[in-house]
Amino acid sequence: MLIIINLLILCIVLFVYIHIYHHIKTSNYLEIYEIENPSKDKLEDLTAMRQPLVINNITLNNMTLDYLKSNYPTFELSLYNKVNDLFVKIKLEEFCKLIVSKDSYNILTYNNYEFLEETTIDKHLEVNDLFLRPYNMLSKKYDILMGSVNSVTQLKYSINSRNILYVSHGKIEVTLCPPKDYKHLHVKKNHETLEFYSQINIYNVEQKYYNDYNKVKFLRIVLVPNQVLLIPPYWFYSIKILEPNTLVFYNTYRTYAGTVAIIPELFMQLLQQDNLKLNITKHFANSSIVTESELKDNNEAKELKEAKELKEAKEIKEAKEIKEAKELKEAKEIKEAKEIKEAKELKEAKELKEAKEIKEI
């Protein structure tokens, strides 16, 4: 009986190990596979090879930016602010005006999960799931990406089991990089959002990253409507928008085994979120605990500061008045000196004239 239990445990461990290994294994061949009209089984076999895969001539339920603008103008998108690496909310109609303005540069919106849910577009996207999603799917997430012409995303990678990118309207260029170049890309990890991106801007490389950048090899592919790109886990990718009104959908899926494989990252995300909440709670708690003596000291300090500022303002005003009086006195003296000089010159001219008349007589 004990032997049977041990064998059962061994089989379970082996089963879990094989599935986890299948998820975390990577391929580093610098090549993109292409196929047309594959069957579901053929698609699964190709994705198991962990290579980027392009499916051509695939018919999906597409939509355009004009359709979104006419039906959901007041719904909010997440506008990416590259200065502080945060997102701000903006209405769809305002975003559309922004990306066509003359000053538009690298205007980009993504992480729009709420937008898709509120507009029920995610239900529209589920129609494509039957073919694109993996077997044993645990969770899924849809995103929509739009931006001005030549706007780009950061070079980053995903730890999801399957990542699918397809253009609903317009044209994009996708830059890909295999996982083996991780060490050269100066990756920054954001465990709070589970985003892992390179600090190197591959479209405008800084001098300090130039040597490492030259060690990395990239693949570039242009995607148009009716093409789907499957990006393997841990492969780096960056998106560049090539045409106006481009609209891109980005679907991510997790399987049961894939979720088990990324438990360490999920645990780090949980800790990060708890630490963030704890820090916010401590901040508000500490700021709310103020004793009566502290309030009194603060009031006295405030009164002293105001008195000092009032005294300084008075001194500045007096100094200004003295300066103005001095300037007025100097101006008056200059005017008097000028008048004396003019009177003297007039007198000399008169005397010279009289002397000339006497000489002529």
Image (cartoon, helix red, strand yellow):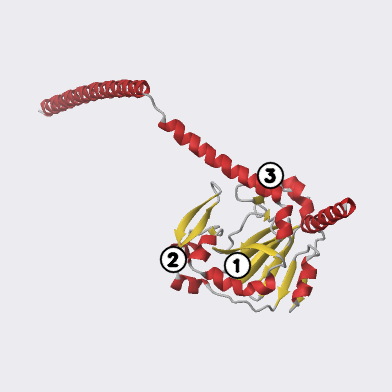
Judge the density around disc 1: few (<14), some (14-19), many (≥20) Cα neighbours within 10 Å: some
Q: Nearer the viewer, residue 229 or 262?
A: 262
Disc 1 versus disc 3: distance between alpha carbons? 34 Å
> What's the amino acid at mark 2?
Glu
Q: Are marks 2 and 3 in contact (CB under 8 Å)?
A: no
Q: Amino acid at mark 3?
A: Gln
Decide which of tag 2 and tag 3 comes sooner along the chain: 2
> For mark 2, what is the residue?
93
* Residue 224 percent across, percent down from the top left: 64, 73
Position of 18 relative to 356 (above/below): below
Query: In this rendering, does residue 169 appear at all?
Result: no
Residue 151, located in which quarter of the rendered image?
Answer: bottom right
Direction from residue 207 to residue 314 in the image, left or right: left
Q: Secondary structure at mark 1?
A: strand
Pointer 3 residue: 207
Q: Does 207 appear above or below 221? A: above
Residue tagged by mark 1? 249
User: For the residue carrying disc 2, how many other residues have a C-alpha within 10 Å: few (<14), some (14-19), or many (20+)?
Assistant: some
Q: Find residue 48 and report its image quarter.
A: bottom right
Distance from disc 2 to disc 3, alpha carbons, whole Å, reads 39 Å
Return the disc, 1 or 3, that comes first in the chain's sequence.
3
